[in-house]
Amino acid sequence: MTGAFDLVTVAQLDVIEQARGRCARLVARVRTDEQVERLEGLAPVMPLDERVRLVAALRDVDDVDVATDETAADAEPGLAYEFVDVAAPAHAEVLRPRPEGRVLPVVPDFLVRTDPRDPGARTGYVPGGWDMFHIGHLRILERARAQCDRLVVGVVTDEALVSAKGRAPMVTFAERAAVVAAVGIVDEVVADSSSNKLLAWERVGFDVLFKGDDWRGTAKGDRLEAEMAQVGVELRYFPYTPHTSSTALRSVLDAR
């Protein structure tokens, strides 16, 4: 299938799911920045390399390539996604989100993390807002997954984000959870409604907690380290990358 794949949304997940259900192997062909601007009248919010990496991370996508001018030549303005069955080259159709919308998964408040098949598995937990899922989010998940056997991701609820940041997220909790759950390296998704990570530990039972290094050396970071040490959990920090953020994306979208 061919598309812009700009921002990861439940609408994108819906059409990808439709396409994957019609073939044994799904290749996503990503349009270049120039093609997107020519067809849609606006440049994409995310650059090509980031859009390629994000769509490649989705569990329903088997491979990714970049559309050439020839492959995009027949596209019409406003065309969202084009599905081509390679077994029938003459057949192409536009895939759009289903009118009834994608069925969003029910995200439980907690999960029991005991796996009798692999009792020695090391579980990692990384909480976050994951608003307007972008390349910075994916890098965090990739780093976390490389340092544990099983990755559980906490998605902060809308109410908790409003309480912490003073504003609502651009994307609702159910949709943010659905997007995170669609990433292939994520094993489980849980709701995170409290800044008290001991409550999360009681529910999830993780062995290592991942946080951004903007917490390191701060009063809240020191408090978190002490709390996690009480239950034998290792706290690992990741580099904070302010150049790619949901705040920056919000500014771009607000300006349009």
Image (cartoon, grey):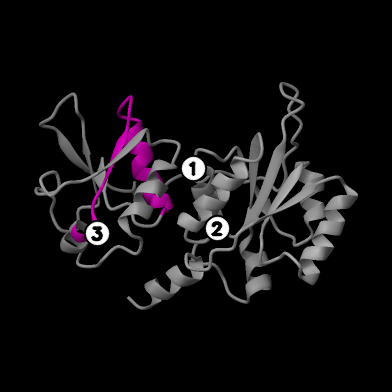
Between circles 2 and 3, the one closer to the viewer is: 3
Provide the residue designation for mark 1.
182
Please, is residue 5 above or below residue 159 in the view? above
- Residue found at the far right of this picture: 230
On whether residue 175 falls in the magenta region, the answer is: no
Disc 1 from disc 2: Cα separation: 13 Å
Q: Can residue 180 be seen in this view?
A: yes
Q: Quadrant of residue 70?
A: top left
Disc 1 from disc 3: Cα separation: 24 Å
The dot on residue 130 is: 2
Q: What element carries label 1?
A: loop
Q: Give the range drawn in magenta.
A: 8-34
Query: Which of 56 and 116 lies nearest the eye of the viewer?
Result: 56
Q: Which residue is drawn at 30% across and 29% down?
A: 22
Disc 2 from disc 3: Cα separation: 24 Å
Q: Residue at x 71, y 38 (%)?
A: 123
Q: Label 1 sits on what residue type?
A: Ala
